[in-house]
């Protein structure tokens, strides 16, 4: 009986720890995502949830820059250098 | 005179002559052409560049009277002269190699003639070269590229440490000069430099040890935590904890900088909401160091975690079962089975991470930029590592020679440490423990 209690406690403790760790690891990521919906150009702000929700930054990204081209370029370089690096230098 | 000595001597005087003596006409002609082109080029061009490498320029920018007008005349640009000189030096080395090979060839063919062996025709020589020295032939082009594109810049940046190329002595207005070990001397004995150097070096080493230890231990522990049989939804936890790895460092560090802000940062406002006094995360020298280590843990732990996962899945289950039969508790199992296996598989990576942390530019530069400023330091702050100090010296203060000295120090440190410890790891000594 006592053994099962400690076992349950350990399971509970492990999960609690994992929840806390996940929170720490996700919080800045969540902050970044929220920043993208905020008005203004700064990453710096004092609240997590934006006061005025906006998609204008996404619109600007796709309309005013060649983002898709940049993304494809990144992808090409990453894929090629991985391939070449693996097969040429072993 | 014996044929091989004669041929070698003739080739030493003029390339190709020994080959003519050996009656290899076409080969001799090729050698003669290459050799005379080389010697002409050396005499005409390279000597001037080599002279420039030694003197680093003789005339600074100056006003010259032309008729009634005085005009500004560009002086020698010491840094360009240095690069040109280095290229000339390498070209000279290549030519020397060719000349020696030409002498060797004449000598060998001469020896063959003494033994009354038939000498090769030009076509036969070419074929023999393709057969015997094919590897060298193919490697020649990459080798030349490596010499000029990798070794030359390295040598150049090392040589800068031995000049006085630092603000205000900047070409073309001033001439740069060789100063031998002067910069190293200043770094160690001149008070402003040596106190900064000592302080920054100490913090760099402390940082490298703590940063490596925290990320490594944290990563392994989290991996073990998730790997426990009692934990549900392993894939979910793994995914959640890997997220920091997927965000570009630059963005996450800038956000962290905002979060740790003393006045407006969310962390301090949450602490205040709890009734605690906020911490001066970025402005207090001690807490700034703690902050960069925390930020580094957030970024670095996922990497070790992924690696540790990979190793944990390769540990056979029956080892643990056998340990349980023997009555081992979970700590003992971790200590005697998990840890040695993980350490064995990741030791080289641990060393690489330590070396990488010595040069961890991103975290420091983007998180604190070396601040808070230390008034006793020369162009450095409390959290500056050697690399970020180097960056500031070279790009903000134009102290190139001192930056280069630091670069050499970092290189020596990282290289000796890596070689020493890599040779000591068990995965180097017993390459086949797991396999």
Image: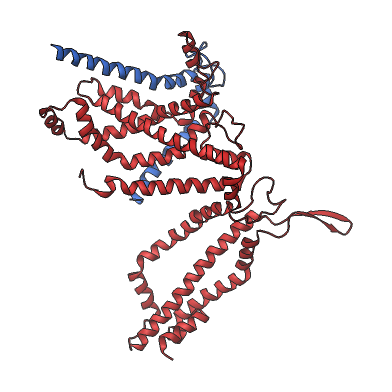
Chain colours: A blue, B red
* The image quarter in which residue B132 lies: bottom left
Q: Is residue A76 shown to the viewer in this render?
A: no
Q: Please state the horizontal and vertical placement of residue B385, each as a whole percent of the image.
A: 51, 37
In the image as oriented, which residue stretches furthest toward the right?
B68
* Above or below B345: residue B147: below
Please state the horizontal and vertical placement of residue A6, each as a whole percent of the image.
Answer: 19, 15
Q: Is residue B281 left or right of residue A17?
A: right
Residue B74 as seen in the image, left or right of residue B265: right
Location of residue B82 by image quarter = bottom right
Compared with B177, B406 (above or below) is above
Q: Position of residue B373 (x, y in %)?
A: 59, 30
The residue positioned 50% from the left and 54% from the top of the image is B149
Q: Which x, y percent locates residue B23? A: 43, 86
In this view, B58 is above or below A43: below
- So how many labels did they put on this image? 0
Quarter assignment of residue B24: bottom left
Q: Nearer the viewer, residue A73 or B98?
A: B98
Q: Is residue B87 above or below residue B413?
A: below
Residue B350 visible here: yes
**Residue found 20% across the figure and 29% down from its top:** B332
Report the residue at 45% width, 78% height from top.
B103
Look at the image and tell me in which quarter the N terminus of chain A lies.
Answer: top left
> B89 and B116: which one is in front?
B89
């Amino acid at each position: 009986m006592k053994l099962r209690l400690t076992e349950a406690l350990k399971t509970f403790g492990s999960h609690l720890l994992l929840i806390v760790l996940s929170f720490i690891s996700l919080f800045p990521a969540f902050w970044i995502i929220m920043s993208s919906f905020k008005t203004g150009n700064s990453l710096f702000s004092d609240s997590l949830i934006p006061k005025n929700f906006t998609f204008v930054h996404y619109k600007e990204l796709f309309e005013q820059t060649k983002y898709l081209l940049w993304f494809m370029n990144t992808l090409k370089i990453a894929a090629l250098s991985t391939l070449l690096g693996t097969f040429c230098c072993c | 005179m014996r044929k091989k000595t004669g041929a070698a001597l003739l080739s030493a005087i003029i390339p190709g002559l020994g080959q003519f003596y050996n009656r290899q006409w076409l080969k001799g002609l090729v050698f003669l052409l290459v050799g005379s082109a080389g010697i002409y080029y050396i005499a005409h061009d390279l000597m001037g560049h080599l002279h420039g490498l030694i003197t680093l320029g003789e005339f600074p920018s100056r006003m010259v009277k032309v008729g009634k007008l005085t005009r500004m005349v560009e002086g020698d640009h010491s840094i360009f002269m240095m690069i040109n000189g280095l290229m000339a030096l390498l070209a000279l080395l290549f030519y020397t190699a060719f000349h020696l090979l030409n002498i060797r060839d004449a000598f060998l063919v001469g020896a063959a003639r003494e033994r009354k062996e038939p000498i090769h025709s030009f076509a036969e020589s070419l074929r023999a070269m393709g057969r015997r020295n094919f590897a060298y032939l193919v490697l020649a082009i990459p080798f030349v590229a490596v010499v000029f594109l990798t070794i030359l810049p390295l040598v150049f940046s090392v040589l800068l440490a031995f000049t006085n190329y630092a603000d205000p002595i900047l070409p073309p207005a001033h001439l740069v000069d060789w100063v031998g070990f002067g910069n190293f001397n200043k770094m160690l004995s001149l008070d402003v430099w040596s106190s900064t150097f000592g302080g920054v070096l100490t913090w760099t080493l402390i940082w490298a040890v703590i940063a490596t230890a925290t990320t490594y231990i944290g990563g392994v522990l989290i991996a073990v935590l998730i790997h426990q049989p009692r934990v549900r939804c392993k894939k979910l936890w793994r995914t959640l904890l890997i997220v920091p790895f997927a965000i570009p460092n630059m963005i996450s560090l800038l956000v962290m900088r905002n979060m740790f802000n003393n006045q407006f940062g969310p962390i301090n406002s949450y602490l205040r909401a709890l009734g605690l006094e906020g911490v001066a995360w970025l402005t207090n020298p001690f807490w700034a160091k703690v902050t960069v280590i925390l930020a580094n843990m957030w970024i670095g732990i996922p990497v070790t975690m992924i690696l540790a996962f990979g190793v944990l899945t390769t540990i056979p289950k029956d080892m643990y079962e056998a340990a349980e039969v023997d009555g081992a508790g979970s700590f003992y199992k971790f200590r005697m089975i998990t840890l040695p296996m993980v350490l064995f598989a990741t030791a080289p990576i641990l060393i690489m991470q330590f070396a990488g942390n010595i040069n961890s530019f991103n975290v420091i530069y983007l998180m604190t930029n070396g601040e808070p400023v230390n008034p006793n330091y020369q162009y450095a702050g409390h959290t500056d590592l050697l690399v970020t100090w180097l960056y500031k010296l070279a790009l903000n203060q134009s102290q190139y020679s001192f930056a280069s000295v630091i670069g050499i120090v970092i290189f020596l440190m990282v290289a000796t440490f890596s070689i020493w410890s890599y040779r000591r790891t068990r995965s180097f000594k017993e390459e086949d423990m797991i396999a």
